[in-house]
Amino acid sequence: MAVIYFVMGVSGSGKTTIAQRLSELKNIPLFDADDFHSTENKAKMSAGQPLNDEDRKGWLDTLNKLAIKQSHADGAVIACSALKESYRKILTQRVPVDVRWIVLMGGFELIHQRMTARVDHFMPAGLLTSQLESMEYPPYGIHIDIGQSPAGMMDLILHNESLSEFGLAGLGVMGKSLARNLGAHGLKLSLFNQHVAGKEENVALNSIAQFEELRSAKGFDLIEPFVQSLSKPRKIFLMVPAGKVVDHMITALLPYLSPGDIVMDGGNSHFKDTERRHEALKSNHIHFLGIGVSGGEQGALTGPAIMPGGDEVAYDSIKPILNAIAAKDHQGLPCSTYIGPGGAGHFVKMIHNGIEYAEMQILAEVYWILKKGLGFDNEQIALSLEEWNKKSAASYLLEITYKILRHKTGIDYTLDLIADLSGSKGTGSWSLTAAAELGMSANLISESLFARFVSSLKTERKQAASFAEIEIKPVAITLDQLYEAFELARLINHHQGFEIMRTASEQYGWNLNLSEVARIWTNGCIIRSVLMQSIQTTIIGEQNLLVAQKQAVGEQRAALAQVVANSLSSGIPIPALSAALNFILAYSSENLPANLIQAQRDFFGAHTYRKQDDPYGISYHTEWE
Ligand code: 6PG
């Protein structure tokens, strides 16, 4: 991958000399930002007047365009003062490759002496004071003391160049795949995995030996050399189990980190933990990003959907890397985007998983209706679902379902050999709690989660089944009705998930772009689907999915009601489909019996109530007895 080097510092700090040497060494073109100043700017500076932000705007834009252009060529070394963080933002915006900053630092005396010795330069020495006053040295980049010889400075730069660009800690299934993905994109990697005698020994070195993409990586099982092997600002991606392990890793890394380093958590961490860690590391001037990664083992290897949240400045510096390894949408854009500050990335990933829970449960119920209610065998179910997958209901989860149904172990269908016990790791129940905290309905997620809990009561279920003796009767529905019910339940599930995110965004001030969230979920992630592609265009602004698709909702509601009523009376539990029907009926009812709930609350607790059609929202109370 091409690299853009910015050699920055005030006028007279020796940018041109270092940039020249670097360009010769790397064999990439050199550009001196001074050559890009307008004649007006040059005249102003020659007259001893410092440039202001407005004067520099056009110049910075031109240099930014140059950096983008060179990103698609051999890269570049650009010598540029880049005095302020806001200037550096302009210089690097939309630059699609790695940007490295070489920061030349020195005191007034030394630089002034050098400037007065300079001939043929439009910048008078008198402007140095204003330059030094404006200079905001970045916490990132390779910081070089210009008091040393150019050769010494080059040694320092090269030493940093010999270091790895990116560190990944935790080489479990996902970590290993992600490392291979990063390696395949030409990143210089350092890999870390803990040493656990007899269990996890030489994991990093073994992975490097095993996978071609990791051949140039460095492997470690000790934290200190792992951190020291990384160039500054260090970029360390944690792929360790969510929970205490993340805190342990951060504590272990901290003594070796420097201000400006970036720690990223790519696991399924709780967004509140991410906010806490973000705040804690801020006081050490360490950036912390909570990054949702979806796509399982295969996705991590070939392109996951990536949901980064946290400091935007830190995000900007790893953006090219995330964009490179992410899946691509149908327009070729990366399925990765800055989600928002603090824990926003992990919140969005959590809701992704909440939606995933309900998508899986709906599919499980469809499978059960087809099997128990319509008497289909595994092959027939697979065939029907494969047909559905050619239509608007197509999704990754539907695709893997019919593949699962066809899979055999010996003469048996593998699915029939699997115990009916479904586990969960946390994101489903967190989604539910988060929705409740925001006062939002998530009844599909809750039913899907509780269905997993009920499944775990195998012994009790066995006992209860022996005395309940429920005999499942054929379900009187058509395949088309089931398809329509399936589509509507999925739409309602997605509606709930997106509305939870909309409310969270308002409540927590995240400014989430829901259409962009849908876009990055159109590929790479577990809930990618044709529906997600249409959500990308419908969830713009205030519009919610059920309103946007009101015609389809109206047409499919009768089918959902038929499927739910008939399946239930036939003895088939369908908690998610029922929840979808209940939700859409309540959501579409102008009047609900909530008046009674409120009257009861007022009766026993004087909680007050509001009156029908009262535009003022006045609270009333009745002495009921
Ligand atoms: C993904 C998956 C992934 C993981 C979940 C499953 O997006 O790649 O959702 O995050 O498989 O942990 O959650 P449960 O184990 O709770 O089902």
Image (tube, rainbow, N blue to C red):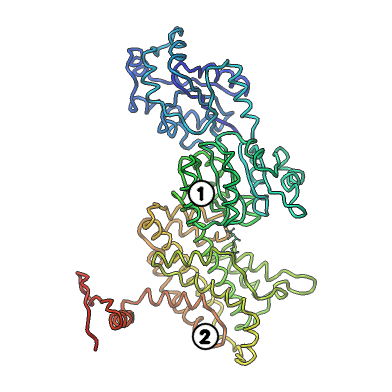
Q: Position of residue 465 (x, y in %)?
A: 63, 88
**Which numbered circle lies on residue 566?**
2
Residue 207 lies, with reference to residue 547, above or below; the image says above
Label 1 element class: strand
Residue closest to the eye, 520 or 162: 162
Q: Amino acid at mark 2?
A: Asn
Residue 221 lies, with reference to residue 69, above or below; the image says below
Q: Amino acid at mark 1?
A: Pro
Nearer to us of marks 1 and 2 is 1
| Residue tagged 1 | 308
Q: Position of residue 157 (x, y in %)?
A: 59, 25
Residue found at x 45% / y 19%: 107
Label 2 element class: helix
Question: Quadrant of residue 182 in the image?
Answer: top right
Residue closest to the eye, 440 or 66: 440
Q: Position of residue 124 (x, y in %)?
A: 38, 12
- Estimate the spatial distance between the alpha carbons at disc 1 and disc 2, rounded to whole Å: 44 Å
Residue closest to the eye, 284 or 479: 284
Q: Quadrant of the C terminus?
A: bottom left
Q: Position of residue 127 (x, y in %)?
A: 37, 16
Dot 1, how many residues are within 10 Å of its Cα: few (below 14), some (14-19), or many (20+)? many
Q: Is residue 111 left or right of residue 191?
A: left
Q: Is residue 427 left or right of residue 164?
A: left
Dot 2, how many residues are within 10 Å of its Cα: few (below 14), some (14-19), or many (20+)? some
Decide which of tag 1 and tag 2 comes sooner along the chain.
Answer: 1
Residue closest to the eye, 332 or 191: 191
**Which numbered circle lies on residue 163?**
none
What is the number of callouts on the image?
Answer: 2
Residue found at x 73% / y 47%: 207
Residue 24 lies, with reference to residue 274, above or below; the image says above
Q: Quadrant of ligand 1?
A: bottom right
